[in-house]
Image (cartoon, rainbow, N blue to C red):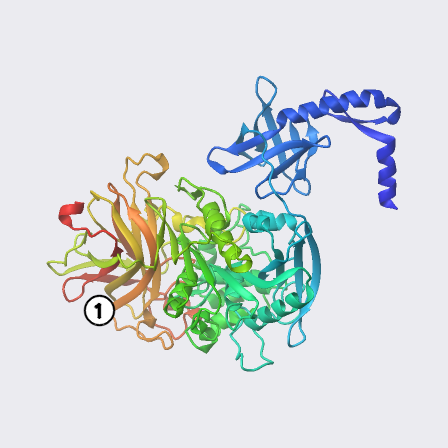
Amino acid sequence: MTQRRVALAALCFALLFSPNGSFRLAPLAQAATLGQAASSATSQLDALSGEYTDPSDPDTPISFYTQDGKLILESERMVPTTLTENSPTEFGVPQSKVTLKFTLDAAGRGETVIAANDPQVIFRRTGDAVRHVFHDYQRSEVMIPMRDGVKLHTVILKPSDISAPLPFLIQRTPYGVDGTSRGSFFGSRPELARDGYIYVAQDIRGRFKSEGEFIMSRPEADHHDPKAVDESTDAYDTVDWLVKNIQGNNGRAGFIGTSYPGFLAMEAGIDPHPAVKAISPQAPMIDVWMGDDFFHNGAFRQSYGYDYVFGMESNKENADVSYGKDKDGKPVDGYDYFLQRGSFTEDVKKSGVKQPFPTWRLFLDHPSYDTVWSSRAVENHLDKVAVPTLSVGGYYDQEDMWGPQEEYKKLEPHDSEHENFLVLGPWRHGSWSSSSRHLGNLNYGESIGKEYRSQIEAKFFGHYLKDQPGFDLEDTASFQTGSNTWKRYSHFPPKEAQPTSLHLVGDGLLSWSDAKEPAKTSYESDPANPVPYRHRPIQVTYSNGSQWFNWLTEDQRFVTDRKDVAVWKLPVLKKDLIVTGEVLADIFASTTGTDNDMVVKLIDQYPDNDPDPKMRGYQIMTNEEIFRGRYLESFEKPTPMRAGSIHEYHFSLHDVDHVFKAGHTVMVEIQSTWFPLYDRNPQTFVPNIMTAKPEDYKPATITIYSGNDHDSNLQLPLMNACDHIECF
């Protein structure tokens, strides 16, 4: 009935545009003047039509054109959207608070457009409007039964304008699929949406509209037990139902996902359904204790563990996190928030939560690497390449850098069919989905995300799910920073990379030669004044305005001059130094305490005369990691360190593909706090740091040793050997 009344009103009245920019309603008797007005309005809209581009990001243009007397907005990612006209040069975007404002040139044509909420970004007219292909994806919802009777909420998008049988492209997620639509598919994965798939998005057990119990990083079940369930069996059962019940499929399925969905994509490749022909785990959380979200080498990621679990386990959906307000009404700095509370036990007590969330309880009761964590470790089950696998990761991934690198490494010995592929680039967590040329202050000169998606990801799935030609990746593709070029390798690290020792010698110097004389470098680490991991204030991880996403690209000068940070440098390079592969730290150190954290950072310092003003003197980390001293002997059984004794810390700083350019300086920094991302080590051994008391936290003097007997060094995989004569 309501629709009929609206239609009737439309027949009785017409919208008339007036010169002062307002609207008034006119009866149909004025139809003679309406035709002229409509023609004039269309002409004005045509003057705004065209492609507009942000000069700083030329790979993300937007287009405007007229259709049926309305101004339409679209881009590569945005399905055609009819704008609401507020004035001749101001338009609203439906179902949003965004207002677009145009300026005109002397001829009255559109010259620039901005979003009123972000006026610093100016899109300038660069040509005629560009139209894109958008398939007509029709949406449906189903509850798919699993083998134990639990039903999982699933959204299916099927293109009605493609008659040929299509494969399934599936993403399973804990983050909710209600928003899955034609628009969201093109917005997040434009190349795959344009290629045409039956796209499936599913809430995993216990999340949003799915039945069952949610278990964070659900442990792997015994697949010999037909009644056992895990994420792998749920993926199997989902594919089995889809193939049998959704018409127009070609009998093949692929899985894709980033972060937690990346972990779920990897699970789909363990004892997979026969129809699964390709998976792409992107930034998967492979082992959340060893090197992904919650711990790194035993060091607990305090602020992230608190924020993420609060957001995930407060209810079946996603909850907001707050650190409260200060006396001036501003958000409390996370540095102060966690420092005032002390240990994680106090975080939980003061959180306002009546009972610790299940994963918080795991943190509190299982701080070491026991079966609770090893049962969740996917790498223990990667003993064959069951389906073609495309692992994707970022060198600046602030959440799951380790996962894709470890996944590739574990699968590579079993890759007899050459179907284990790896793509690495200078991306933060998931930012290969972006078409920007920038990451923080860094400018790579090209849209590396767009190149990856079109040239590798789309062709990977096209090849294995549709038998399309064009996928030519032999093994690994890496975007090499410094040179800012794509490289392809037959294996990673490439065989040409030669591990070479970069020695930490006396007087704050680095050397390719062994230290001639023993040397020591000391600093005092005080838990009461920990080194911040990024610039303050530190916002809630996923809050509006949070700087969490790009922190690995931040300029390290903000901590370099601290007395609790030890620094070593090479002389300024005279030629390029190419480092490709895994960087290893081998540090000999003592402490006056009985426990210690070792943070090692490899840094590229830009020259003071760099052509880019904002990069002059910039210190960008290329590799970084932490190791908790109590686990030097065993990750399963922590032991106290003998005060004053020299201990060897040997651990990975992960993969890199970087050119330290001539004129730049190679630096190494070592510190013992990285707060509040990592909880403070009391530096006095306690059985469980999660429950440490205020009196347990004590200053300690850390000493780094150099010399023949205790050769502190970094192992750099050099592609071009460097010695004093060549480089300095």
| Residue at x 87%, y 26% (from the top left corner) | 27
In the rendered structure, the answer to whether residue 333 lies left or right of residue 665 reads: right
Q: Residues within 10 Å of mark 1 (few under 14, many from 20)?
A: some
Residue occupying the far bottom of the picture: 225
User: Circle 1 — which element?
Assistant: loop
**Residue that badge 1 annotates:** 646
Q: Is residue 106 above or below residue 591?
A: above
Residue 176 visible in this rendered orientation of the protein = no
Q: Nearer the viewer, residue 36 or 313?
A: 36
- Residue 5, x across and y down, in percent: 87, 41
How many numbered dots are placed on residues in this image?
1
- Residue 465, x across and y down, in percent: 54, 59
- Say what amino acid the circle numbered 1 marks: Ile
- Residue 479, x across and y down, in percent: 38, 49
In the rendered structure, the answer to whether residue 611 lies left or right of residue 344 reads: left
| Residue at x 27%, y 61% (from the top left corner) | 585
Q: Nearer the viewer, residue 115 or 191?
A: 191
Q: Nearer the viewer, residue 535 or 468?
A: 468
| Residue at x 16%, y 51% (from the top left corner) | 723
In the rendered structure, the answer to whether residue 541 lies left or right of residue 205 reads: left
Residue 655 visible in this rendered orientation of the protein = yes
